[in-house]
Amino acid sequence: MHVIVVGAGIIGVSTAYYLNAAGCQVTVLERHSGVAQEASFGNAGVIAPGYVTPWAAPGMPKKVLASLFEKDAPIVFRPNLDPRLWLWAIRWLGQCTPERYRVNRERMQRLAFYSRIQLHALREEHELQYEQSEGLLQLFRSERDLELAQPGLEMLKAAGVRHTLFSAAQCREVEPGLSENPLVAGLHLPDDESGNCPLFARLLRDLSAARGVTYSFGARVLGIESAASGVVVATEHLRLPADAVVLATGVDSARLLRPLGMRVPLYPVKGYSATVTIREPTYAPLHALMDEAYKVAITRMGQRIRIAGTAELGRRDLKPREAALATLIKVARDWFPGAADYSRATYWTGARPMLPDGPPLLGTSRVPRVWLNLGHGSTGWAMAAGSGRILADLVTGKVPEIALDGLTIARYA
């Protein structure tokens, strides 16, 4: 079976690897010059299944409205006249109830926990090193932050996720580089981790290419057509026949699906990150951290620190917002002021492919031989290996190892 995978982000590369391992002939089409060039490129690197949650949550609408008046808000809404934005927002609001939040969170975490198992199996089989570290520490600056986190703590307990609430002193024992910035408590999740997502994607590309996967870069896909015995994928220069196609194109998936009669409620949510070289290792982080007040993640990637955060809805352009970049640096300086020269940071802005309820779309579309692996939002790295394995199982007629209810196009029927 010849399968074309459209998109070579972490989702597409993972899908290609598992399809190849399942015996398929695989061609990957990517419009950029290499793998992991869009949403996968500048993410925080956090792999925290217990922390994976939908953006649609109780209390979030109030935070979004407040962002209209706060320049350093972690969630930013910029209204415009795009009808797709308002249709997405209406669906999103409908998912911000406690019951819908619990359902969507369970769906996302089911996939994320399975994905971590697959990631570890890959790492052990191929002895992969991608600047990984173990443990996540969630920092609470105030009693209010800790109070708002209580429902999440209850869910972690119910899900059997190992976690411990640390005092400020215990947080500094785990992370000796932490400054004396006001700190009430910290939530330690020892089984969560972080790693360099683009580096992992390149390693997986090399492994899969050595096993026969063909990567075609600079190949922008114009459309997909059904054929008598399969599909035809049209690029700017070629028309490629295949038995099936998997869309792992992130935000661009909506453009490719519309001519096929499918309108997926996918909208770009802009995110930011900053990267700095470590100047003094003694004062640098050892693990992944999350500042709960600002929703900013800080991770160590070898001799660099990655600071990532802010979700901005309503602007399709990737022009950076200076206030968002300043917030990232403020948070890093608050906790690790002596670790780096933050004036020399390099910045990234990217569009995360977000669905209004949170979980991605996996599996068959409504079009024969067109498969979906998209809409992972800001948690694509945490779900990539599991999503790739599931798609390979489905395409080759196998039963996936986890239930897919709530993860397929059926929920938008």
Image: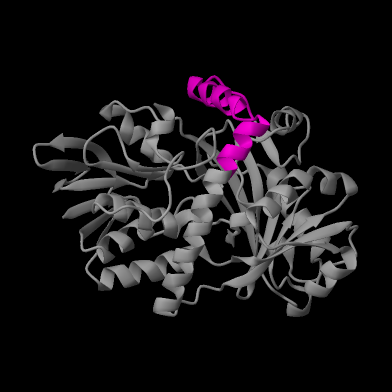
* Closest to the observer, 320 or 351: 351
Taking 336 as reference, is 167 left or right?
right
Q: Residue at x 55, y 21 (%)?
A: 86
In the rendered structure, does residue 103 fall within the stretch colored magenta? yes
Up/down of 301 relative to 41, above or below: below
What x and y, as percent, mark residue 218?
30, 53
- Left or right of 25? Residue 119 is right
Question: From what the image shows, is residue 412 above or below residue 209?
Answer: above
**Residue sitting nearer the eye, 136 or 84:** 136
Q: Is residue 149 magenta?
A: no
Q: Position of residue 61 (x, y in %)?
A: 69, 29
Q: Quadrant of the N terminus?
A: bottom left
On the question of residue 8 being in view, the answer is no
Residue 140 seen in the figure: yes
Q: Nearer the viewer, residue 69 or 214?
A: 214
Could you tell whether 123 is left or right of 313 in the image? left
Between residue 215 and residue 87, name the one nearer to us.
87
Residue reaching furthest left?
A: 228
Q: Is residue 361 above or below residue 135?
A: above
What colour-coding does the image apply? Answer: one colour
**Which residue: 66% across, 64% down?**
299
Residue at the spot 38% in from the left edge and 35% down from the top edge: 409
Image coordinates for residue 340, horizontal then vertical, percent: 74, 70
* Image coordinates for residue 277, horizontal then vertical, percent: 65, 71
Q: What residue is drawn where x is 50% and y is 42%?
A: 359
- Residue stretch in magenta: 78-105
